[in-house]
Amino acid sequence: MNLQKTALDVLKETSRTFFIPISRLPTGLKEAVASAYLCMRAIDQIEDHPDLENAVKSRMLRQISLVLQAGDRGFTSEDFRPIFASELEHLEEVTLRLDEWLSYAPAEIAPRIWEAISTMSDRMAHWADCNWAIHTETELDQYTFSVAASVGLLLSDLWAWYDGTKTDRIQAVGFGRGLQSVNILRNHGEDFTRGVAFYPRGWTDDEMQAYSRRQLELASAYVESLPEISPARDFCRVILTLAYATLEAIQHGAEKLSRSEVMELVQQVTAS
């Protein structure tokens, strides 16, 4: 493991899709969004890990949440060593360097990110405890709010902090839910093989796609409301375009967009 790699290096390795729009953000906002994204990937890697028992996931996620609740001036690797020690062989670099990502954002906004990650981590623990059992649309709403909608709300706070951009928070929730519901569709087969089903009882791809489109309508309104001069608009347009394109690909029988399709779409959006 090369511990000298920068946050943006790790971001590029973790998600080329998000690396491009994040790397285009102005200084300050770029570090804040990168910090939030890497922290979310750090805990998400625990939640989704195929070799960790649910009880282990729940314990680790709750302990991370409590560490973050006790933070005031930042974090070090020692804060998380007791949590990670027994599972080092299972955890990826993005998780093991969580303390660095927490410290990467500008100091004046970092505590808002800590609060969001703490909340998300605790909610992830709850869903690990119940093996992500989703039986109704209400429970699907609860699951998609627990992390993804919180991401939308966090982004709204980051835009407001950076340049005073104001957003509709209901639309921000739809932005997060829309992105996650597309991911649920994209990963449905893989999730099913590990015994997890995010579809409410009786739902097929048709119902989940309809749910995604309802949420993406809110997401579209959210993006359209962002000022043309705000860097938030460019960032969100890229993410929303990829979500819609992925949904279209799934409806036409593909599992996901190819890397070349992703890069072509990103270039089209960022050039316009």
Image (cartoon, rainbow, N blue to C red):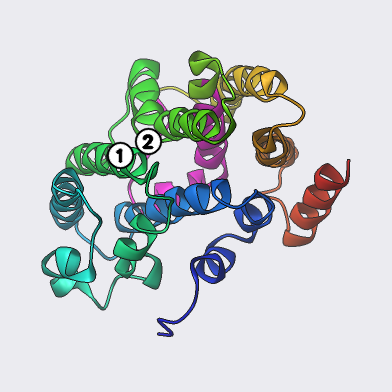
| Left or right of residue 123, residue 222 in this image | right
| Left or right of residue 255, residue 248 in this image | right
Image quarter of residue 80: bottom left
Instruction: Give the mark nearer the N terminus: 2 vs 1.
Output: 1
Q: Is residue 170 above or below residue 85?
A: above
Q: Residue at x 19, y 52 (%)?
A: 64
Image quarter of residue 148: top left
| Left or right of residue 156, residue 89 in this image | left
Q: Amino acid at mark 2?
A: Val
Q: Residue at x 32, y 62 (%)?
A: 98
The answer to whether marks 2 and 1 mark residues whose Cβ atoms lie closer than 8 Å is yes
User: Does the segment drawn in magenta span residue 103?
Assistant: no
User: Does the segment drawn in magenta span residue 182?
Assistant: yes
The answer to whether one can see residue 50 in this image is: no
| Left or right of residue 252, residue 32 in this image | left
Q: Is residue 220 above or below residue 25?
A: above
Q: Residues within 10 Å of mark 1 (few under 14, many from 20)?
A: many
Residue range highlighted in magenta: 174-200
Residue 193, position as x, y percentages in the image: 40, 53
Element marked by disc 2: helix
Q: Residues within 10 Å of mark 2 (few under 14, many from 20)?
A: many
**Overall secondary structure of the magenta section:** helix
Q: Residue at x 46, y 30 (%)?
A: 157
| Residue 147 image label | 2
Q: How many marks?
A: 2
Residue 114, position as x, y percentages in the image: 30, 44
Element marked by disc 1: helix
Q: Residue furthest bottom?
A: 2
- Label 1 sits on residue: 120
Q: Residue at x 52, y 28 (%)?
A: 160
Image quarter of residue 42: bottom left
CA–CA distance in space, label 2 to label 1: 5 Å
